[in-house]
Amino acid sequence: MNRKYVIILLAGLIWACGQDKTTDTAVVESPVEQPASQPDRLDPENMKEQGRELFGEKTVNTDAAGLVDVETLKGMLPATLNGMTRAQLFGEAANALGFDVVEVSGVYTTSKGENLSIDILDTGGNPSAIGMLAGWAKSEVDRQTPNGHEKTSYVGDQKVLEKHNPATNRSELATLVNMRYVIKLRARQTTVEELKNDLTALGLNKFDDLQ
């Protein structure tokens, strides 16, 4: 009887130890795949680069998207402007953060080697793209910063956003034409008033024919 009792007791201990081992086994979770990193904020100045990172390369059909073709939009930048000669001309249809746009850029130089950059973007009238690129158009801005001023003003009846940094003598001017075309001018050693004259010389009425 004692021997049987010992055998039963040993069997019970072995079973208990097996249970403890099962209970103490650590559960290893399979690693969770992390989503691709997203930019902290959307930067309007780098929309195309961020768009490529998030959405990859995408072929834009300008006709299907209701956009002006690249060559036509490039024609809006004349060979000469206010005595300056166009030295560079570039254009592309691209996807910017999910928005199809056409952008052309021109660089004008003076006899002194000074440069004026002009960018024209056709948003196709997409409200989301306009809100990101020209959200100031529906508000009044008057801001002083350590880097200068930023405010809305007018060139005739055309509302513009002007920026000037006195430390670097860099000026910028932006406007939204026909609730569709975003035009930006940038230059160093140039006043805002000079950029306004360049915008006038560019001729905004000709954009009416692109509708």
Image (spheres, helix red, strand yellow):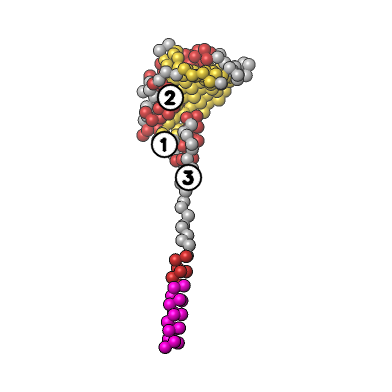
| 188 or 115, nearer to the observer | 188
Counting residues from the start of the chain, the first of labels 1 and 3 encountered is 3
Per the rendered image, the range of residues in magenta is 1-17
Indicate which label's residue lies in the foreground, 1 or 3: 3
On screen, 197 above or below 42?
Answer: above
Quadrant assignment, res 157 = top left
On whether residue 14 falls in the magenta region, the answer is: yes
Residue occupied by mark 3? 36
Mark 2 belongs to which amino acid?
Answer: Ala
Helix, strand, or loop for circle 3? Answer: loop
Mark 2–mark 1 Cα distance, whole angstroms, equals: 17 Å
On whether residue 11 falls in the magenta region, the answer is: yes
For label 1, the crowd category at 10 Å Cα-Cα, with few meaning under 14, some 14 to 19 and many 20 or more, is some
Indicate which label's residue lies in the foreground, 2 or 3: 3
- Residue at the far right in the pictured view: 112
Residue occupied by mark 1? 98
Mark 3 belongs to which amino acid?
Answer: Ala
Indicate which label's residue lies in the foreground, 2 or 1: 2
Mark 1 belongs to which amino acid?
Answer: Gly
Residue occupied by mark 2? 134
Helix, strand, or loop for circle 2? Answer: helix
